[in-house]
């Protein structure tokens, strides 16, 4: 069930709009099509409330009805593309990432931090090496990913603690770091050395290297990574792929600074 809307003062919170966003978020890969009853159950709304929102979204072209089921339409992508088109990183990074993927012969991605998760802004796949299908808008936990640790390294210590919490984190594989103190140590190491390597923590057989992309104020604006199979020699990865990754991250950072980002 989607977390219910918490009422706020009316001058700062449009409850009907927030509920509409809840309905949109209730559709995902697991629930690509839903009945009115399912939408109401997943959002905590009444059937009448869910129906009004679905009909409004249908009228705006964001939802389409097929019998008793509702589906999102391609027009919903306008909402996400508005963000991407307003970000200089999207335009600046793509050609650099294409060259990096070709040089390293590995998949290349760029992501930003959103709470405790990373969100993919751009991905140049070389070949499929994950069981997860990743694309623009995909989310992964920050604590056990190379880009996540780089991005968390751009936060202050208290902010990192707030994101990680105090309880053990979910164990994705037998080698995932789950204790917040251990993750904090890995984040600090990544921050100090200027890059991060994570092997087999998100998914068995997956190794990834990430480096920060900085804005003109020196803040971490995004993270860039390359991913490969864990059976690839690690030293060769550090000797060959890491320099190319760091060069690409610096190139994007320089472009971002010159455009005022």
Image: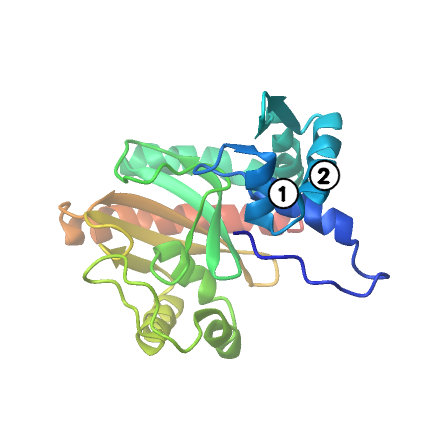
Would you say 141 lies left or right of 46 here?
Answer: left
Q: Which residue is most to the top?
A: 67
Helix, strand or loop at label 2? It is helix
**Residue depicted at 17% across the width and 53% down the height:** 234
**Residue depicted at 23% across the width and 53% down the height:** 238
Front residue of this view, candidates 7 and 106? 7
Front residue of this view, candidates 91 and 59? 59
Residue 45, how many percent across, how many down?
Answer: 65, 49
Residue under pointer 2:
53
Residue 6 in which image quadrant: bottom right
**Residue depicted at 40% across the width and 68% down the height:** 191
Residue 4 in which image quadrant: bottom right
Q: Residues within 10 Å of mark 2 (few under 14, many from 20)?
A: many
Label 2 with label 1: CB-CB less than 8 Å = yes
Residue 208 seen: yes
Residue 195 in which image quadrant: bottom left
State whether residue 8 is above or below residue 72.
below
Residue 76, how many percent across, how many down?
Answer: 63, 32
Front residue of this view, candidates 130 and 199? 130
Q: Residues within 10 Å of mark 1 (few under 14, many from 20)?
A: many
State whether residue 155 is above or below residue 261.
below
Residue under pointer 1:
23
State whether residue 57 is above or below residue 182.
above
Residue 223, how many percent across, how many down?
Answer: 45, 53
Residue 209, how many percent across, how many down?
Answer: 31, 52
Helix, strand or loop at label 1? It is helix
Residue 88 seen: no
Would you say 37 lies left or right of 101 here?
Answer: right
Q: CA distance from mark 2 to mark 1?
A: 8 Å
């Amino acid at each position: 069930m989607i977390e219910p809307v918490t009422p706020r003062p009316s001058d700062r919170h449009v409850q009907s709009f927030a509920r509409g966003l809840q309905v949109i978020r209730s559709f995902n890969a697991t629930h690509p099509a839903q009945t009115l009853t399912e939408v109401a159950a997943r959002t905590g709304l009444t059937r009448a409330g869910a129906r009004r929102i679905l009909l409004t979204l249908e009228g705006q072209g964001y939802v389409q009805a097929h019998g008793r089921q509702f589906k999102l339409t391609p027009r919903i992508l306008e909402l996400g593309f508005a963000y991407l088109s307003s970000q200089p990183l999207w335009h600046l990074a793509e050609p650099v990432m294409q060259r990096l993927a070709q040089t390293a012969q590995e998949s290349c991605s760029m992501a930003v931090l959103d709470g405790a998760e990373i969100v993919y802004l751009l991905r140049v796949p070389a070949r499929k090496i994950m069981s997860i299908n990743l694309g623009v808008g995909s989310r992964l936990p920050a604590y056990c990913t190379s880009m996540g640790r780089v991005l968390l390294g751009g936060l202050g210590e208290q902010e990192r603690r707030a994101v990680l919490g105090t309880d053990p984190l979910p164990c994705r594989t037998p080698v995932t770091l789950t204790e917040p103190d251990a993750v904090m140590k890995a984040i600090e190491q990544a921050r100090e050395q200027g890059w991060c390597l994570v092997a087999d923590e998100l998914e068995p057989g997956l190794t990834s290297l990430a480096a920060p992309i900085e804005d003109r104020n020196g803040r971490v604006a995004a993270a860039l990574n390359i991913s490969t199979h864990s059976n690839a020699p690690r030293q060769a990865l550090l000797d060959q792929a890491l320099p190319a990754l760091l060069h690409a991250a610096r190139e994007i950072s320089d472009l971002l600074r010159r455009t005022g980002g």
